[in-house]
């Protein structure tokens, strides 16, 4: 916000208004400011913000290095991010003496962000402020010659290079740290294999939860395999390798929503889209992988072991019903440590095999062993 100055309402010579948009709030980087609900005005030379009580702010377009458009959602408004160069030494009195950020954000709470972004991008490309003389605070005219223009361009390039270098430096540090953590996870995995018999069940569970959070060492990406069927086949192989153990531990199946969360947590920065995950799971069975995709009649989609026998699972559920006399989906979920949705599907599967029958009452849905086909 230290690049903004108070505006007296007088435009420069040959300065023209391009667009106006109501309902705009100003952010100093990530920090909210008291400047909300005002009118944002784009001219050929600057961006103006007109607020209540005749408060007017001005930001010179010559200070803008580049802009980005940030899409909104149902809970967030669309925004335009302005990355700024250093404030000039002869800057007018502004709203802030200094700022911790080198960018500001315009929050469009009443729409119009995309149109404003396009016209602001055009104004930055035209650079009308360089074509006409600019009056400084002492009232002297400074003609923008070729040398002045070259200096301004060089200053913008230097500032942009500085921002980009800092961003990539942080990203490099993060990647190096991730590689170290993955190496550590592989080392721990080997130790678990060597000393598996000496570890308690609680220690094994704790180690495995830590390993899952450390991620996949070499994730399959579109940059390496493209975006077609080859990418989905390679991704399916890696998913089967990573998820076979967790699926087996979860009783033979995991809901696809849980798979999506587990995989993206393990991949770190290389996130998967829901569409890519679904396409990869669809080709698992054709590749004879240990996992396959299955959709129940209710619409619930799961990833399950390819060796899983539906009749055998139904009989195991029937044995649990015999032991407990009756079960609800919630009780079976607690008993097997699986989600309520999957527990309900197991009970419905036993019912389809005529091994269980239901009692649907005001107390809820319960399942009992089916003795009708077994006893006279």
Image: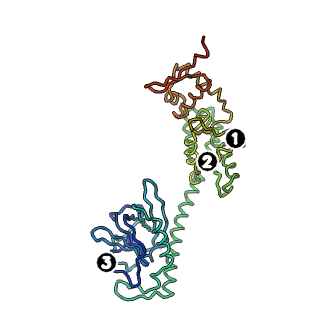
Is residue 109 toward the left or the right of residue 180 in the image? left
Measure the C-alpha gap from mark 1 to mark 2. 14 Å
Q: Residue furthest top?
A: 376
Question: Percent position (x, y) of residue 197?
Answer: 63, 32
Residue 321: image x %, image y %?
55, 21
Element on which disc 2 rests: helix
Question: Along the polypeptide, which appears first: circle 1 or circle 2?
Answer: 2
State which tag comes first along the sequence, 2 or 3.
Answer: 3
Residue 164 horizontal/vertical position (percent) = 53, 67
* Contact between labelled residues 2 and 1, with CB atoms less than 8 Å apart: no
Residue 371: numbered disc: none
Q: Secondary structure at mark 3?
A: loop
Q: Nearer the viewer, residue 242 or 308?
A: 308
Q: Which residue is mark 1?
A: 285
Q: Say few, some or many: other residues with alpha carbon within 10 Å of mark 3 (under 14 / 14 to 19 / 20 or more).
A: few
Residue 8's label in the rendered image is 3
Q: Residue furthest left?
A: 53
Q: Is residue 178 above or below residue 99?
A: above
Between the residue at mark 2 and the residue at mark 3, the CA separation in whole angstroms equals 56 Å
**Location of mark 2 (residue):** 277
Q: Mark 1 near mark 3, Cβ–Cβ under 8 Å?
A: no
Q: Badge 1: few (under 14), some or many (20 or more) residues near its Cα, within 10 Å?
A: some
**Do the CB atoms of the residues marked 2 and 3 lie less than 8 Å apart?**
no
User: Measured from the top left, where is residue 129 in percent x and y?
Assistant: 44, 81
Q: Nearer the viewer, residue 330 or 176?
A: 330
- Mark 2: few, some, or many residues within 10 Å (few <14, many ≥20)? some
- Disc 1 on helix, strand or loop? loop
Residue drawn at (69%, 41%), measured in percent from left and top?
285
């Amino acid at each position: 916000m230290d690049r903004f100055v108070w505006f007296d309402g007088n435009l420069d010579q040959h300065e023209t208004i391009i667009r106006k948009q109501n309902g705009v709030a100003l952010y100093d980087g990530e920090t909210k400011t008291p400047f909300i609900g005002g009118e944002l005005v784009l001219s050929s030379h600057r961006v103006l913000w007109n607020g209540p009580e005749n408060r007017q702010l001005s930001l010179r377009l010559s200070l803008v290095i580049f802009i980005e458009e940030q899409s909104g959602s149902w809970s967030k408004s669309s925004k335009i991010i302005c990355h700024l160069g250093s404030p000039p030494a002869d800057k007018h009195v502004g709203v802030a003496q200094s700022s911790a950020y080198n960018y500001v954000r315009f929050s469009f709470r009443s729409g119009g962000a995309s149109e404003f972004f396009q016209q602001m991008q055009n104004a930055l490309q035209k650079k009308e402020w360089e074509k006409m003389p600019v009056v400084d605070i002492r009232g002297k005219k400074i003609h923008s010659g070729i040398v002045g223009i070259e200096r301004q361009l060089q200053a913008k390039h230097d500032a942009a290079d500085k921002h980009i270098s800092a961003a990539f430096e942080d990203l490099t540090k993060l990647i190096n740290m991730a590689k170290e953590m993955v190496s550590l996870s592989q080392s721990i995995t080997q130790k678990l294999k060597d000393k598996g018999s000496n570890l308690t069940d609680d220690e094994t569970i704790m180690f495995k939860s830590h390993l899952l959070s450390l991620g996949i060492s070499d994730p399959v990406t579109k940059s390496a395999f493209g975006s077609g069927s080859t990418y989905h086949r390679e991704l399916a192989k890696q998913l089967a390798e990573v998820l076979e153990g967790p699926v087996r531990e979860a009783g033979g199946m995991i809901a696809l929503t849980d798979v999506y969360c587990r995989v993206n947590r393990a991949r770190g920065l290389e996130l998967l889209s829901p569409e890519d995950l679904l396409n990869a799971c669809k080709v698992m069975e054709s590749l004879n992988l240990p996992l396959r995709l299955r959709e129940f009649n209710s619409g619930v989609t799961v990833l399950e072991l390819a060796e899983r026998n539906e009749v055998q699972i139904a009989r195991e559920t029937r044995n649990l019903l015999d032991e407990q006399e009756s079960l609800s989906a919630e009780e079976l979920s607690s008993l097997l440590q699986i989600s309520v949705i999957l527990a309900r599907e197991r009970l419905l599967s036993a019912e389809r095999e005529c091994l269980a029958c239901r009692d649907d009452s005001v107390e809820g849905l319960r399942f009992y062993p089916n003795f009708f086909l077994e006893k006279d």
